[in-house]
Image (cartoon, rainbow, N blue to C red):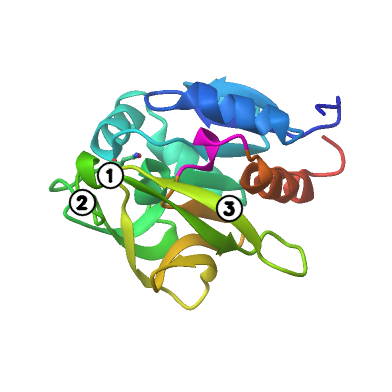
Amino acid sequence: MVTTDAPCIGVLALQGDVSEHVRAIEAAGGRALEVRDADGLERVHGLVIPGGESTTVGMLLTRFALLEPLRRRIERGLPVYGTCTGLILLSRAIDDGLEGQPHLGCLDVRVRRNGYGRQLQSFEADIEMRLGGDVPAVVRAVFIRAPKIVATGGAVEVLAWHDGVAVAVRQGSLLATSFHPELTRDCRVHALFVEMCRAAVPISS
Ligand code: GLN
């Protein structure tokens, strides 16, 4: 249920599956706001970067003058949840990206774009994910031309694995999954992010 003290969570709305994230955030108890410019970015307590095409979103972040303001807000502690393309944009290093592909580079992981293969190799799997409870939750994970996490730094906590590969990670206020929980009716991953945003909201706001 969305309450007036619910954190306001932006969904970067330059390209990708924006409406699915808006629905999942609201189902998880957050207030969702589509963010397209720096003014919108200033109004949110957290931001979701949806799936889409990382080269396009990176280019649009630059064109809409959002890349540097977003990086600065992340450095000041803004919680960000990246799914798929969002994971790529957050990552420190991208294999098989375009030369000079704009990205944020604040999550200490290396990803390989399309590391699970092309569209036809898209798949779903049940994975166990640590969502804060005593036991891991079973989550249906949808992988679509997903990036593969090929290395993680020491500050990165792996929340879920699939076939020995990290598929959900957290580093402080950053959360990222190579899969798309917003494409299922299960909003527990978004609920974890809503809680991260709630914890990060200054008491006065
Ligand atoms: N392969 C896409 C990219 O490089 C990501 C796909 C997705 O977000 N579902 O951005």
Ligand 1 occupies quarter: top left
Is residue 181 within the magenta segment? yes
Circle nearer the N terminus (3, 1)? 3
Residue contact at pointers 3 and 1, CB within 8 angstroms:
no
Q: Which mark is residue 145?
A: 1
Residue contact at pointers 1 and 2, CB within 8 angstroms:
yes
Q: Residue 190 carries which label?
A: none
Residue 12 in the figure: left or right of residue 186? left
Residue plotted at (55% across, 43% down): 73
Residue plotted at (46% across, 42% down): 180
- The picture places residue 171, in percent across and down from the top left corner, at 55, 63
Determine the residue located farthest toward the left in the rendered image: 99
Q: Which mark is residue 139?
A: 3
- The picture places residue 117, in percent across and down from the top left corner, at 20, 51
SS type, badge 3? strand
Residue 152 in the figure: left or right of residue 1? left
The residue stretch that appears in magenta: 180-185
Q: At label 2, which amino acid type do we have? A: Gly
- Crowding at dot 1, Cα within 10 Å, few <14 / some 14-19 / many 20+, comes out as many
SS type, badge 1? loop
Asked if residue 9 is positioned above or below residue 174 in the image, the reply reads above
